[in-house]
Image: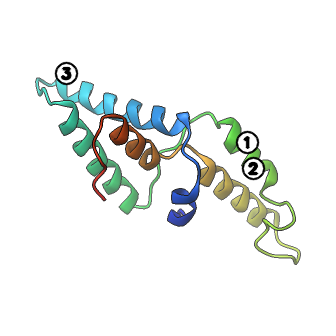
Amino acid sequence: MTHNTNEDENAAPSQADIDTWRILKKALKNALFDRGIKIAAEEASLVTRFMLEQIETSGLRVVPVKPTTEMQRAIKQALDQGKRMSVTWVKPHTKQRWRYQAAIDASPNWRRGYILDQRADGGQPEE
């Protein structure tokens, strides 16, 4: 599934975005430390960002196992008038795919969390 980067960039960052980024970064840093590799916080950010970008180029996306409130709201609103991708009748499978895509698009986004985390540390994120 592809995601809409314009929509991701325009969405307001949330605490869930920051938390998601920090959880992923800490997990990678701890995994490396458990294997005897100690890296600085800045290095952990760079390695985590690289890893997540590689995952996304493979067509995958990191999303919560349990849907967030925003994801649940997006699922409920996915077929509302104006959000549907078609006004004609569509198969239930298509509707389910639209709901699923809406949930993914509404999930916490590590990129927004990364940007906010970099600004909080006093640096500007590299794009």
Residue 72 - label:
1
Q: How many marks?
A: 3
Indicate whether 24 appears above or below 55: above
| Residue annotated with mark 2 | 75
Res 68 quadrant in image: top right
Q: Which residue is drawn at the image coordinates 26% and 24% (left, top)?
A: 30
**Local SS, label 1:** helix
Compared to 58, does 23 lie above or below?
A: above
Image location (x, y in percent) of residue 81: 87, 65
Which residue corresponds to the image point at 80% horizontal and 76% vertical from the top-left? 86
Looking at this view, is 14 or 83 the one in front? 14
Residues at marks 2 and 3, CA–CA distance in whole angstroms: 39 Å
The amino acid pointed to by label 3 is Asp
The mark found on residue 15 in the picture is none
Tag shown at residue 34: 3
User: Foreground residue, 62 or 110?
Assistant: 110
Find out whether the residues at labels 3 and 1 contact each other: C-beta distance under 8 Å.
no
Quadrant in which residue 114 is drawn: top left
Q: Amino acid at mark 2?
A: Ile
Which residue is pictured at 21% across the width and 37% down the height? 42
**Is 107 left, or right, of 87 in this rendering?**
left
